[in-house]
Image: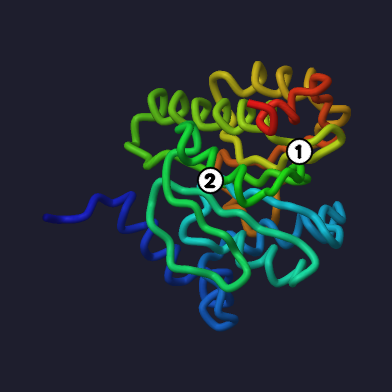
Amino acid sequence: MARSKSSSRWLQEHFDDAYVKRAQAEGWRSRAVFKLEEVLERDALLQPGMRVVDLGAAPGGWSQLVQRRLGSSGKVFALDILPMQGIGGVQFIEGDFREPEVLAELERHLEGHPVDLVLSDMAPNMSGVAVSDQIRAMDLAELALDFCRQWLKPGGTLLIKLFQGTGFDDYLRDLRSGFDRVTMRKPKASRARSREVYALAMGHRAASGRQQRHAHE
């Protein structure tokens, strides 16, 4: 079956991409690590002892980078419905993070400690139909925000990929109502023509006691 012009263009861009070549040379699982690396360095997001959850983690580039930065001083939990090859020092939980069984496993691994940082580089499998792709992307973003409401500690941080389009402004309003400060980041490794941006939401305003409810259920 012949490839479409757009998919052929994407493949050509991908193989010519300097970040792809660099990721392969340096042993990273995806070029996306360079997006996260830029934000980590600009905003000093990681501190020793942090517990970090990476939503939609496969193939694992972000978890790989965070684990290298934190080492044994912190904990990294990677969640995805897709299987993922193991990463030393990263606790991978395969399954849908909306499901009670998956959340119960996360809770066991957290051992009563709060989540300091939630990362989400999730995106739907793009169909090429802009309207439906945008709706599905915003649905994933809503799921990540719901996760933060239940698991992210007061004062914690969320870094999430968003796509500009329908629902984007409403989502930012929701973020600003739940966090003290929300700023936008467009890392150099993001392709210029992509609608993707990253929202960095800091200072989570958690409802009192909400994060502790799991321990008492």
Mark number, residue 184: 1
Q: Would you say 49 lies left or right of 76 here? A: right
Mark number, residue 105: 2
Residue at image point 28% right, 51% down: 5
Q: Position of residue 150 (x, y in %)?
A: 67, 28
* Quadrant for the N terminus in the image: bottom left
* Quadrant for the C terminus in the image: top right
Q: Would you say 190 lies left or right of 185 here? A: left
Q: Is residue 168 above or below residue 13?
A: above
Q: Residues within 10 Å of mark 1 (few under 14, many from 20)?
A: some
Q: Observer-nearest residue: 100 or 162?
A: 100
Q: Position of residue 45 (x, y in %)?
A: 82, 53
Q: Position of residue 49 (x, y in %)?
A: 83, 59
Query: Element type at marker 1?
Result: strand
Upstream in the sequence, badge 2 or badge 1?
A: 2
Query: Element type at marker 2?
Result: helix
How many numbered discs, if any? Answer: 2
Q: CA distance from mark 2 to mark 1?
A: 32 Å
Residue at image point 56% right, 63% down: 61
Q: Position of residue 73 (x, y in %)?
A: 80, 67
